[in-house]
Amino acid sequence: METMEGSKGVADVVVNCEPDVVACFPITPSTHIAEDLNKAYMDGKLKTYVTVESEFGAISTIVGGSAAGARSFSTTSSQGLALMHEVIFAAAGIRLPLVMVVANRSLSAPLSIWNDHQDTISERDSGWLQLYCETNQEVIDTVPLAFRIAEELMLPVMVCMDGFYLTHAVEQLDIPTKEVIRKFLPPYNPKIKLDPENPITLGVYAKPEHYQDFRNDLDDDVHAAREKIKERSKEWANIIGRGYGDGLIEKYNTDDAERVLVAMSSVCGNIKEAVDELRANGEKVGLLRIKSFRPFPYDEVKKALTGKKHVGVVEKDMSAGAFPPLYVDVASALYSETVPLSSFIGGLGGRDITVNDIKELFKKLENEPVREWILKRELPLK
Amino acid sequence: MIEVRFHGRGGQGAVTAAELLAVAVGYKGWHSQSFPMFGVERRGAPVQAFCRIDDKPVRIHQNVETPDIVVVLDPTLMKDIDITSGLKKGGLIIINTVKKTDEFNLGDYKIITVNATDIARKELGVPIVNTAILGTFAKLVEWVDLESLEKAIKGRFEQQLADKNINAMRACADETHV
């Protein structure tokens, strides 16, 4: 264990995954990851680090690298991810096993540098797998897993970490070494790659008789990724001695709970704290943490929540004019069940969802279901 | 869990102070979590940084609202900011100031004053007090000591600068009267 910033830990584990191509354009709050990777390159620890002119350049560079058979990585946030949008879909369509750590941040306008999940949630339909992590240690442990799953399934993976709450937190972290990672992550040798000796075309033009079949295959394969995520999460947990639920979901005092909150990422630490405090008073409450948002674990969620007295979904994102995305997916999973389901949107643009706020939400789960925004008192400090 | 809140101005090193404290207590076998009040850093603007210390991994992710200890790097902040906000009853306030403890009337708290600016000017040549004021912790709490703080400072700065900062920290510890 070493005390270091979360961003530094991410950069260190990326280096230990031995990528061939890293290309980043710094944007808050992912900047320190990019800076630490750039430094690692200058210290001779990375094969390639491409300084690019924009996030569009960063994603395009790693698409090129990956298409040529290179293990490729980038990191970004918010507007940077939005600028990548066009290439994000292309990367999944070409079936390139990119790994990108997204330091989650709100989208403009109004301009905010702080944390919520709107940036990655807005890429949910792209064909990238999305794994949301609660702690810095989980992000670090998930990066090698992401490379393994990506390269096995030929699907890109976003590892989502809360901006500032994780990226800028200094804590005790354990970085899996190259030797440990090599036991789990074999060298990347794609069957198909760009090669001047054997020219091929990737990302082809597809006419109506073909296009839909490519999309259908992508959808099938992302659905099928669930089993692979579970299998490889278990294998990796056995190697490093740390695991996070079954790889798709994590249940925290869910089994005997009457009231359960469903959430993703670092706010789950606050929910666990609230669960422990309420359980000490005999309240049967629990947390269901969604780690894999894409593919969405419908069966696991249904099994975990069926029979509960009241479930609330807490999320840091929205879909203007519709029910919010995580709530919609949980509701779909529970379609055939009669579980009272509430929706709480909050924590947008860096507003804290505190342990006390969570306790209030659990209190609301004693009443009829609601769909509402988490309102807040004034900040305690000017 | 112990929660510490640092108040300073952009450029005074409040964030670094919180980080060094987190690193130092890590050497002592504690779990810690430090982070800045998430903002766009500007020189001179009020800045907050936090550090949590616990005997198990810190799993909450929210600003420190009810600290046990408040550190004020720049006393001029106290005109605009209620630095005692949320501070637990009987909590500790460490203030970098030329004033004496009894010149403050802040409520039911334990106040420690130290002239860290003078010490930093003497040892570092600049009024950056973040490392100096960490020395007070070694005198006031049992969960961190001068040795672990020294190690943290050595890990952060190149040797010449580290030595100056360590001197400032030790001088500040000597000037801390409980």
Image (cartoon, coloured by chain):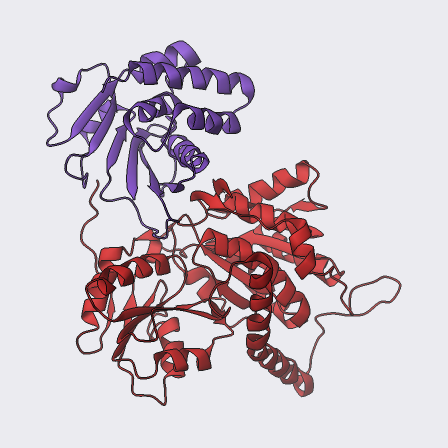
Q: Quadrant of residue A365?
A: bottom left
Quadrant including the C terminus of chain B: top left
Vertical position of residue A86 compared to residue A168: above or below: below
Give the x, y percent position of residue A258.
26, 76
- Position of A224 compared to B169: left or right? right
Judged from this view, the residue extending furthest toward the right is A197
Give the x, y percent position of residue A14.
61, 50
Q: Quadrant of residue A72?
A: bottom right
Vertical position of residue A341 compared to residue A98: above or below: below
Q: Would residue B142 be seen by someone viewing this image from the given angle?
A: yes
Q: Would residue A26 be seen by someone viewing this image from the given angle?
A: no
Q: Which residue is at 49% across, 52% downward?
A: A137
State the count of labels. Answer: 0
Judged from this view, the residue extending furthest toward the bottom is A336
Vertical position of residue A336 compared to residue A274: above or below: below
Q: Which residue is at 30% across, 25% downward?
A: B73
Q: Which residue is at 33% across, 39% downward?
A: B50
Q: Which chain is drawn using purple?
A: B
- Foreground of the two, A326 or B92: B92
Give the x, y percent position of residue A266.
39, 57
Colour of chain A, in one word, is red
- Foreground of the two, A233 or A146: A233
Q: Which residue is at 45% across, 66% downward?
A: A121
Vertical position of residue A134 compared to residue B143: above or below: below
Give the x, y percent position of residue B32.
39, 42
- Position of A161 compared to B129: left or right? right
Quadrant including the N terminus of chain B: top left
